[in-house]
Image (cartoon, grey):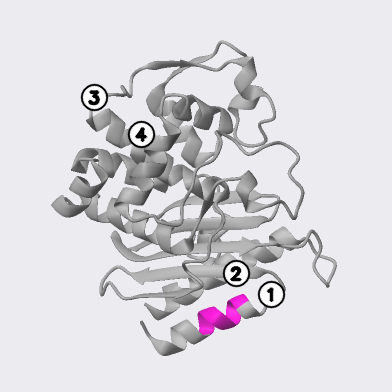
């Protein structure tokens, strides 16, 4: 990894009053660099990439069916603050595949619950640890409502930027037919490709993709919680994976010293980190 790029990435993070951790991997050379990449932070909805891939492993094992009918129930809409299913008429039906898709592309937490209620959380956490995501822990189906800005991390799911880059690299390799990656995850090539495709359908593009050319293909999952903003994804150029980047802006203040919202500074930080990588790699 180029020293001047690493220096620039550190400078972007250091320019803000909040904590920013990041990990970047060059998809061509395999070189990786990070800023506190092993630091455990709130995962927010970036955790959903691991949920998706564990669910696809269960599909491969014959324990889940993508065509299974799921029902949007009123109990699942309570305290949901993301996605669109919270506004749908209770009783609406959809296949499990669509619940998985909306869990990712609109970060829908009704869809997330529909998926997680068909999984075992202990098995999900064990799967994460087995593939090398040693800093990742899933604790509840959705975050508790009304968490304060300074909430303890034990109240929510947690992860690291290193873990997310590792997972995304496995998905990338698995979709390309790498037997070691597919074997480790328990997800065959065609389902790795489905997972990768779903991540590219992401509708929330105000973090990593925000300063990239508008047509840039990015396979990613964003995160938003009371403490910060995050994003982790694979950035493509000319149809090929260029780099993988995970960014976690934690303890972001509600208002910055200039009076602007803290979340806007977090968005800009992720965008600048991604742009620096795009320009240098």
The stretch drawn in magenta includes residue 215 = no
Decide whether the magenta segment is chiefly helix, strand or loop: helix
Ranked by sequence position, the earlier of labels 1 and 4 is 1
Magenta-colored span: 8-13
* C-beta proximity under 8 Å, tags 1 and 2: yes
In this orientation, which residue lies closer to the viewer: 105 or 248?
A: 248
Q: CA distance from mark 3 to mark 2?
A: 40 Å
Q: CA distance from mark 3 to mark 1?
A: 47 Å
Could you tell me residue 5's position as x and y percent?
A: 45, 83
Asked whether residue 272 appears in the rendered view, the answer is yes
Q: Which residue was labeled with disc 3?
A: 62
Where 153 falls versus 99 (above or below)? below
Q: Residues within 10 Å of mark 3 (few under 14, many from 20)?
A: few
Q: Which residue was labeled with disc 4?
A: 55
- Mark 3 residue element: loop
* C-beta proximity under 8 Å, tags 3 and 1: no
Could you tell me residue 253's position as x and y percent?
A: 77, 62
User: Which quadrant holds residue 265?
Assistant: bottom right
Ranked by sequence position, the earlier of labels 4 and 2 is 2
Q: Residues within 10 Å of mark 2 (few under 14, many from 20)?
A: many
The stretch drawn in magenta includes residue 9 = yes
Q: Which residue was labeled with disc 2?
A: 20
Q: Which residue was labeled with disc 1?
A: 16
């Amino acid at each position: 990894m180029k020293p001047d790029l690493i220096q620039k990435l550190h400078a972007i993070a250091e320019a803000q009053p909040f904590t920013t951790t990041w990990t970047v991997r060059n998809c061509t050379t395999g070189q990786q660099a990070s800023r506190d990449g092993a630091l455990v932070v709130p995962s927010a909805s970036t955790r959903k990439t691991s949920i998706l891939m564990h669910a696809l492993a269960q599909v491969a094992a014959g324990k889940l069916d993508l065509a299974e009918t799921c029902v949007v129930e009123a109990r699942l809409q309570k305290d949901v603050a993301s996605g669109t299913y919270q506004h749908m008429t209770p009783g609406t039906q959809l296949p499990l595949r669509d619940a998985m898709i909306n869990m990712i592309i609109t970060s829908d937490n009704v869809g997330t619950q529909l998926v997680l209620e068909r999984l075992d959380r202990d098995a999900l956490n064990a799967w994460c640890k087995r593939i090398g995501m040693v800093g990742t822990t899933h604790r509840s189906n959705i975050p508790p409502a009304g968490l304060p800005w300074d909430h303890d991390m034990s109240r929510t799911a947690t992860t690291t930027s290193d873990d997310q880059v590792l997972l995304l690299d496995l998905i990338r390799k698995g979709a390309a037919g790498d037997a070691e990656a597919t074997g480790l995850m328990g997800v065959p090539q065609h389902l790795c490709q489905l997972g990768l495709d779903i991540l590219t359908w992401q509708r929330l593009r105000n973090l990593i993709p925000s300063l990239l050319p508008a047509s840039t293909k990015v396979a990613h999952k964003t995160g938003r919680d009371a403490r910060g903003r995050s994003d982790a994804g694979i950035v493509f150029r000319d149809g090929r994976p260029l780099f993988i980047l995970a960014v976690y802006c934690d303890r972001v203040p509600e208002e910055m010293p200039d009076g602007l919202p803290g979340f806007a500074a977090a968005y800009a930080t992720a965008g600048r980190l991604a742009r620096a990588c795009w320009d240098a790699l």
